[in-house]
Image (cartoon, helix red, strand yellow):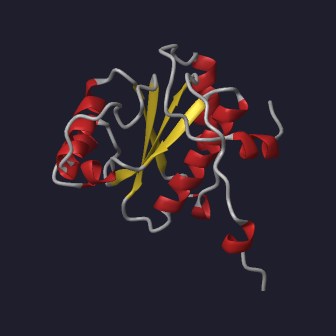
Amino acid sequence: MSNVIDVIQTRSSSRGYTPEPLTDEELDTLLHAGLQAPTAANKQEIHFTVLKGDNPILKELEDEKNRLRGLTAQAHNFYYEAPTVVILSADSTYRWSPLDAGIAVENMALAAEGIGLGSLIIGCIYDALRGEKKEYFSKALQFPDQYEYEIAIAFGHKAVSKEPHTYDLQAQVTYL
């Protein structure tokens, strides 16, 4: 396992994957990283729906995302053909669920980088999963009752590489 600071400094969003599926051990590592994330008041309200990249519901989500945005088919789908997509849902009545899901997905992204996998944190399907087809997608994705989409993440073996983003410490940080 890599040093966590090194992982943070080298991780970037992956937008290209090989067709090689994740092993059970890799997937377990990623799920445990998400499940081990802290949640407000230790509520542990995040639910993880795991899909293979060829699951037909992902195509339906892509189509609905494009319809809502007035787009035609894109060169890549929203998860860039990753072999695994995990959709995080949470208790819609709990105010801290969006933050808790974000923490969980970041744990998973860092774990992926740490074991040599690529990942892409996904928010672009928010409108599709929270819009007029919300109930349909919630049922199809087997969200628990009163749960709704928060965020998603794609995983796979990297087919392309990308440098981590740069930042401007002076412009982005204020010391008081």
Which one is in front, 174 or 24? 174
Q: Is residue 94 left or right of residue 143?
A: right
Q: Residue at x 49, y 33 (%)?
A: 15
Q: Is residue 94 above or below residue 83?
A: below
Image x and y of residue 65, in percent? 25, 45
What x and y, as percent, mark residue 138? Answer: 27, 44
Looking at the image, the residue that sits furthest to the bottom is 176
The C terminus lies in quadrant: bottom right
Rendered location of residue 95, percent (x, y)? 45, 68
The residue depicted at 22 percent of the width and 51 percent of the height is: 69
Residue 166 lies, with reference to residue 74, above or below; the image says: below
Please give left or right for residue 55 compared with residue 3 in the image. left
Left or right: 113, with 72 as reference point: right
Residue furthest to the right in view is: 3
- For the N terminus, the quadrant is top right
Give the residue at the far top of this rendering. Answer: 20
Residue at the image point whose x is 62% and y is 23% from the top: 26
The residue shown at (56%, 40%) is: 13
Q: Nearer the viewer, residue 11 or 28?
A: 11
Query: Image check: 152 left or right of 38?
Result: left
Q: Where is residue 19 drawn, in percent x and y? A: 47, 15
Number of numbered markers: 0
Image: 24 above or below 141: above
